[in-house]
Amino acid sequence: MTDDREGPPVNGPPEGERASDAYGARGSPFQPKPKAPVLQRLMPVSRELPRYRSGALREDVLAGLTVAALALPAGMAYAELAGLSPVAGLYALLLPTVAYTLLGSSRQLIVGPEGSVSALVATALLPLVVAGEDLQRYASLAALLGLLVGAVFLVARAVRLGWIADYFSRAVLTGYIHGVAVVLIVGQLGKLFGLTIDAKEPIPQFAEFLREVSSMSAATLGVGAACLVALLVLRVVARTLPGPLFVVILAIAASAAFGFADHGVASVGMIPSGLPGIAIPSLRLKDILELLPAALGIFFASYSDEILTARSFAGKHGQHVRADQELLAMGLANAAAGISHGFPIGASGSRTAVNDQMGGRTQIAGLSGAAGIALVLLFLTEPMQYLPKATLGAVIVAAAIGLVDLSSWRELARTSKFESWIALITMAGVIAVGVLQALVLAVTLSIVDVVRRSAAPHDAVLGWVQRLGRYADVRLHPSARVTPGVLVYRLDDRLFFANAQYVRGRVHEAVDGSPTQVRWFVFDMEALTHIDATGGAALVELVEELRAEGITFAVARLKGPMLVNFAQAGLLETIGRDHLYPTVRAAVDAAKNA
C-alpha cells in the first residue's frame, strides 16, 4: 500500500462537465463490454472463420500435424499409465479435441491425455477392479469416469464457478506439478527396467523396485535408456522437431528388425485399426457413487491446470480466455472422451507450447491434429504392435522431467517462505497420500496463509510531510510533523473477525507510544473496504475505551459504500456524525480548534 493518500487542498472545482451530463441516462461510469452474438459466444472459433486466410491455414495445419506427432506417443503412454490399452489414448485425442476446438475460447490450447489426469484415473480405478478381471470392465469404468468429469465441468459452468481456479495459488500448483513429476517417474521404473511392479502407490512402488531391481532385464533397460537419452538430447538440440515421434518410429523399426520381443523386451502388441465407435458406458449407480469423488478431484486438478495454461498463452498474444466458456468446453470434451471409449483428459502444456511455437494461431490447428491421429488409426496401426513398452515409459519420464522448473521454487523462496512450505507440503502430499488429498491440504494451507496475513495487516501512524504535501507513515518519513495531542492512525486492510482484536491492540499501543498525551484519535479509513460484525463490535469497544480515557474518536475519509455500511450497522451513532471528516487535514484542524 502506497502513501499517496492526500494532496494539498484544491481551490475551486476542476474544469469539466457535471457527471450527470457526462454519463447521461446510463448513470453508471462503468460500461460493460457489449455481448458478442450468441453463436460467437457459444462457439468462439466461428469468430475467426470470416477473416481466415490461406496463409493462416498452412500455419495451423503444420502446427496441428506437429502436435499430432507429439500426441501420438504421449497419448499411448498416458493410456498405459492410466491402466488402459494404448489405443484408448489415441481415441481420447479425437472427439475430445474436436469438442474443445469448437467450444474453447483459447486459440492455442491443446487438450488430450495428460500425465497428472492419467495418474488420477489409475488411482481411482485400480481399487475398483479385481486383479485379473476382464479389461473391458476397467475400460468401461474409465469411460464412465470421463462422463462424470464432464458432468462436473458442466455443473460448474451452470452455476458459474469459473472463479474457483483462482483459489489454486502458484505455490499449490508448483508443488502439485513437481509431485506429479515424481509420481510419473516412479510409476515408469518397472517399464524401463523390465520389472513387474504390483504396488500402486509411489512410495510402495519405489520400495518394490529397490527389492526387485536385481532381476531387471538388461535388454529392456538398454532400450528404455537409449530412448530416454535420445528424447532429452532432441529436446535440447531440436526443440521444434517432434522428438517423441522420431524416437517412437526408430524404436518400432529396431524392434521389428532385431526381434526385441525375443530378448524379453515387452511390446505394445496389436492395436485395433479404425475409428472408435460411439457408446454410452454402463451407468450403474454403484459405480457412479464410487467414482464421483475421483471425478471431483480430477475436475479441480484438470481445470486449474487448464485455465492457467490457457491464460498464459492467451496473454502472450493479447487474447482473452473466458473461464466459464472453458468449463463448458472441457465438460463436453471429457463427455466426448467418455462416449468414444476414451478416458478423462486435460490440457497439455508441452503440446500447447509446440503449437504456439509452430505458428498455430486458431483452433483449426487442433482439428488438424485430430485429423492426423485419425489417419494413423485408419492406416498405420499394424506397425504399432512392435513398439516397446520401455519406449512409452521413456516418453513419460522425459515429459515428467520437462515439468521440473527450479526457477519457480526460487521465485517462491524470494516472495514468501510460507508459500515455499506450502509447495513442499503439496509435493510431499501428492507423493505420499495422493493428488486429491494433497490438493485439499494445500488449498487449506493457502487459505490459512491468507487469513494469517490479514490477521496482522499493515497499519501506520501518520504525520504531515511538508515536501509531499500530504500525511504519510512516520516510520517511512522521519521528518513528518506530528500534531501534539492528535494521533492519526491508518489501517491498510479490511476490519474483520481475523484481525479485529489485533487492530484494537495496535491502536492502544499507538496511543501508549504517542510522544504527547493523546486528546484526539483520528482513524484514517480511506483503505477500509469491508467490516464484518466482529469488526464492528471491536470498533464500538475501541470507541468506548478511548472515550473512557478522555480521547475523542474521529474518522477521516470514510468512503461512500462504507458510510452506508456504518449507517446500517449503527456505527455512525456510536462515533457521532459530527466526528466524520472528508480529509485527515480537516480532522486534525478540528482537533486543534477543539
Image (cartoon, helix red, strand yellow):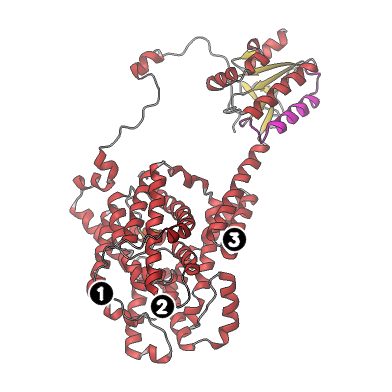
Residue name at image x 40 percent, y 23 percent: 29
Mark 3 or mark 1: name the one nearer the start of the chain.
1
106 or 238: which is nearer to us? 106
2 or 92: which is nearer to us? 92
Alpha carbon distance from label 1 to label 2:
21 Å
Q: Position of residue 117 (x, y in %)?
A: 44, 61
Q: Which residues are magenta?
A: 493-518
Disc 3 target residue? 429
From the viewer's perspective, is 90 left or right of 465? Answer: left
Verify CB contact (< 8 Å) between mark 1 and mark 2. Answer: no
Q: Secondary structure at mark 2?
A: helix
Q: Reply above or below: 551 against 416.
A: above
Q: Secondary structure at mark 3?
A: helix
Kindly identify the amino acid type of the residue bearing the numbered disc 2.
Thr
Q: Position of residue 179 (x, y in %)?
A: 55, 63
Alpha carbon distance from label 3 to label 1:
40 Å
Report the quarter where the N terminus lies.
top right
Residue that extends furthest to the front in the rendered view of this protein: 285
Disc 1 target residue? 273
Alpha carbon distance from label 2 to label 3:
29 Å
Residue 281 location, quadrant: bottom left
Residue name at image x 61 percent, y 31 percent: 494
Q: Position of residue 432 (x, y in %)?
A: 60, 65
Disc 2 target residue? 391
Mark 1 or mark 2: name the one nearer the start of the chain.
1
Kindly identify the amino acid type of the residue bearing the numbered disc 3.
Gly
From the viewer's perspective, is 320 left or right of 362? Answer: right
Residue 353 covered by magenta stretch: no
Kindly identify the amino acid type of the residue bearing the numbered disc 1.
Ser
Q: Position of residue 222 (x, y in %)?
A: 46, 85
Verify CB contact (< 8 Å) between mark 3 and mark 1. Answer: no
